[in-house]
Image (tube, rainbow, N blue to C red):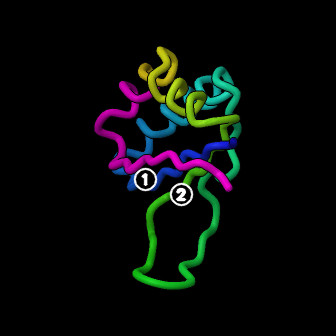
């Protein structure tokens, strides 16, 4: 069953965050993942206005999503991102 990593990001250092953005695609792909949403325009339809950057990744399954997060490539990307953004990242199984 597919799993989705959903991330809400408040970028605090755009220059450093750009370095992270260059590293993350290889980490995602190495575990069979793909970007579904990577920023872009969003509109809040209900509830408090969401102003953070939204990213959605799709993986073949929950294990692949966890493997991505714990991978050496993504650990390196996270190190580069340190101090550049406030992150919330969750993974959820698809329907």
Neighbour tally class for label 2: few under 14, some 14-19, many 20 plus, Cα within 10 Å: some
Q: Position of residue 71 (x, y in %)?
A: 49, 19
> Residue 27, relative to residue 36: is it above or below?
above
Segment tinted magenta in the rendering: 77-95
The residue sitting at 43% across, 47% down in the picture is 89
CA separation in Å, label 2 and label 1: 6 Å
> Residue 41, relative to residue 39: is it above or below?
below
Image side of residue 21 versus residue 14, left or right = right
Q: Secondary structure at mark 2?
A: strand
Please report contact status of discs 2 and 1: CB closer than 8 Å, yes or no: yes
> Residue 53, relative to residue 92: is it above or below?
below
The residue sitting at 55% across, 45% down in the picture is 5
Residue on which disc 1 sits: 9
Between residue 70 and residue 52, name the one nearer to us.
Answer: 70
Between residue 34 and residue 51, name the one nearer to us.
Answer: 34
- Residue 86's label in the rendered image is none
Residue on which disc 2 sits: 54
Q: Is residue 19 visible in the rendered structure shown here?
A: no
Toward which corner of the image does residue 64 lie, by quadrant? top right
The residue sitting at 45% across, 39% down in the picture is 17
Q: Position of residue 23 (x, y in %)?
A: 55, 26
Image side of residue 62 versus residue 14, left or right = right
The residue sitting at 38% across, 55% down in the picture is 10
């Amino acid at each position: 069953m597919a799993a989705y990593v959903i991330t809400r990001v408040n970028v605090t250092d755009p220059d450093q965050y750009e370095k992270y953005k260059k590293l993350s695609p290889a980490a995602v792909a190495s575990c069979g993942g793909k970007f579904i949403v990577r920023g872009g325009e969003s509109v809040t339809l209900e509830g408090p206005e969401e102003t953070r950057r939204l990213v959605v990744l799709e993986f073949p399954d929950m294990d692949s999503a966890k493997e991505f997060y714990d991978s050496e490539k993504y650990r390196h990307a996270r190190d580069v991102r340190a101090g550049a953004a406030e992150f919330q990242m969750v993974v959820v199984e698809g329907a």
